[in-house]
Structures are given as structure tokens and as C-alpha cells.
Image: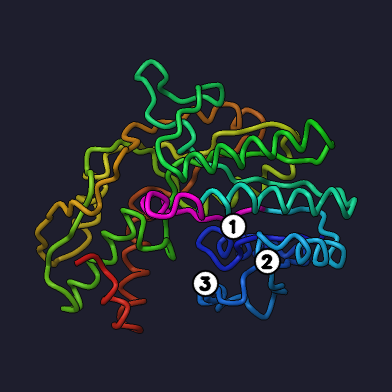
Amino acid sequence: MKILITGITGFVGSHLAEYILSLNEGHEIYGLCRWRSPKDNLAKIYNKIKTVEADLCDLGALIRHLKTIKPDVIFHLAAQSYVLTSFNSPAQTIWVNVIGTTNLLEAVRITEIDPVIHICSSSEVYGQVNEEDIPIKETCPLRPASPYAVSKVGEDMVAYQYWLSYGIRTIRTRMFTHTGPRRGDVFALSSFAKQIAAAELDLKEPVIYVGNLKSVRTICDVRDAVRAYWILVNKCKSGEVYNIGGNITLTIGEALEKLLSFSKKKCEVKVDPKLIRPSDVTLQIPSTEKFRNETGWEPQIPLEKTLEDLLDYWREELSRCPWKALTVTK
């Protein structure tokens, strides 16, 4: 089977490629990436996959690649995925995520191929929910609270429209908070882990700068998430949307406490006003009943292991490349 992963150089894309390769089922994996994208996340598997260069905003390039590859499955993971950044670059975020997804689906329509396409939406589309909406089901009203969330609503709906209008086999997921090794340091838990590791190595002062620690999240390990994505394209129905998420709910502050408990370094915690979003989503507890009932998937990796592995990743990364500590907050 030929599999195309957009955003393969990213956090989730690289883990997904590793997981598919670990199945030893002989699948051909192609990764769509921009020429300037760092390939660090693919270091262990680069010689086992094939990368092709294209930008989602270049419809012609997408058409050429799809004509050549003719993938059986497409995992569309590429996106501008940073919520805080989206407030500074709203038009670019919407352009990449909505127009980029539209271009991909147009390329599929024009080339007349018939892959199953996983469209990675986001739990951010639900916005700030009411307490009576907890746990959040797929039928919950969409109340996007950031330009990123608006872009993901657009991506979500475009995918649904292409299924309705052209029968293109899209399946949408709204993944809730997920983390693990290789998570970008613009995300809260990874930022905390990086700062702790930098402090342990005396690369920065022992102060952890944070945003809103009161937000409630249900956390999933990225390795459980990509296993869910693989099951999705093999078992789930085209045209449908599924919540996917973990089974451990806590505040961001409680997750930070767990990370700090794995370190002998005593660190002070300070709120950085620059890390507070203009509008925030503070209550995200999913109902994943629909997906679990159809697939039998369950998260398997304990939160403690997820956080320890994340911290160990940054310890190793900063030991190898101490200059990366220069990019931590403050």
C-alpha cells in the first residue's frame, strides 16, 4: 500500500511514519514536505521513506506528485499548528490550513485517484464549551476562539464538503491534547520540559515561565494518537468525524507539577504575560465513545511515561545541541 503523509517532518507525522514502518507490512511511505523543513525528526527512518518537496499552497506541485505516487491513503497532518502564533499571523494561518487543504483535495479530485484521506482537524474547533457540554461530543457546537481554531473549522468543513460533493473519501479527526518526545517547544508541556532540562544542564536560570496553568486538558500520548490514526483509515467510515483523546484529565499546572517531580532541580514558576492568549480555551474533556465503539482503540501509555519521555527527549536534545536552550522563553 502506498501512503502519503503531509507534514511528515513534524511531530505527529514523524511518529506516524515510524509506527507504520514498525508494522513490517511492506507499505511504501511518501512524505510531503517543504524544501526548508528540518529533517531532524526523521533521522532514524530517513532511508526507509521517500520525501517529495511541495508546498500545500502550490496546487500544480500537488497534482504532479499525486499523479506520480497514486497513494492509497493520505494522512493530511501539515498545518500552521501554533495557536499563539495564529493571533500574530491570522491570515497566513487560515491560508495555509484552509486553502492548503482545499488544494490537496482539489489535486485528488483533478487526478481522479481514490485514496482514503485522514484530515486532521482539532479539538480547538469546539472553543470554550459550557459545562453542560462536558464531555465534548462530535455534535457539540463549534465556537472557535483563535484564528488557528477558525482555520481548523474551515479545514474540517472543506473536507466534509468534498465528501458530499465529490465522494472523496475524507475522514476527519478532532484530536485533543497530545504530547510526547519531539513535541515543539511552543506547546506548553514541551516548553516546560525544555526549560526544566535547560535548568538541569545549567543552560538557563532555574525559572519556568508559564502561561495559564488553570486550563483543564485530557492528555494523550502521541504514540497512542498515531496508532489511532492508523486504525481510523482501516476501520472508520468516510464522511465521518471522530474525537480522539486520552483518558487522563488534569490542569496544565498539575501536569507541570508532575514534570517537576521527575527532576532534582528546584525551579521557580513565573507567569509570563506574553504566554497568555487573547482568548483561551480552558476546558477540554472529550467524549471518545464514538471512535472507541467503532474501533476498540484505547490509550495504552500512562501519562507519567509520556511526561518522562518528553523530559528525557529534551535532556538528550540539549545535551547534544546546547545552543537550542537559547530559544527557551526568557
Mark 1 and mark 2 in contact? Answer it, CB < 8 Å: yes
Residue type, mark 1 in image: Ala
Q: Where is residue 173, by image quadrant?
A: top right
The vertical placement of 111 against 196, above or below, is above
Q: Which mark is residue 259?
A: none
- The residue depicted at 88 percent of the width and 55 percent of the height is 111
Q: What x and y, as percent, mark residue 248?
A: 37, 38
Taking depth in this image into account, of 328 and 147 the one nearest to the observer is 147
Front label number (3 vs 1)? 1
242 lies left or right of 65: left
Mark 3 and mark 1 in contact? Answer it, CB < 8 Å: no
**Callout 3: helix, strand or loop?**
helix
Q: Read off the magenta span.
A: 76-92
77 lies left or right of 324: right
Q: Which residue is mark 3?
A: 41
**Callout 2: helix, strand or loop?**
strand
Q: What x and y, as percent, mark residue 36?
A: 56, 76
Neighbour tally class for label 3: few under 14, some 14-19, many 20 plus, Cα within 10 Å:
some
Q: Which residue is mark 2?
A: 32
Neighbour tally class for label 2: few under 14, some 14-19, many 20 plus, Cα within 10 Å:
many
Q: Which residue is mark 1?
A: 78
- The residue depicted at 30 percent of the width and 36 percent of the height is 216
The vertical placement of 67 against 38, above or below, is above
Q: Where is residue 29, by image quadrant?
A: bottom right
Residue type, mark 2 in image: Leu
Mark 2 and mark 3 in contact? Answer it, CB < 8 Å: no
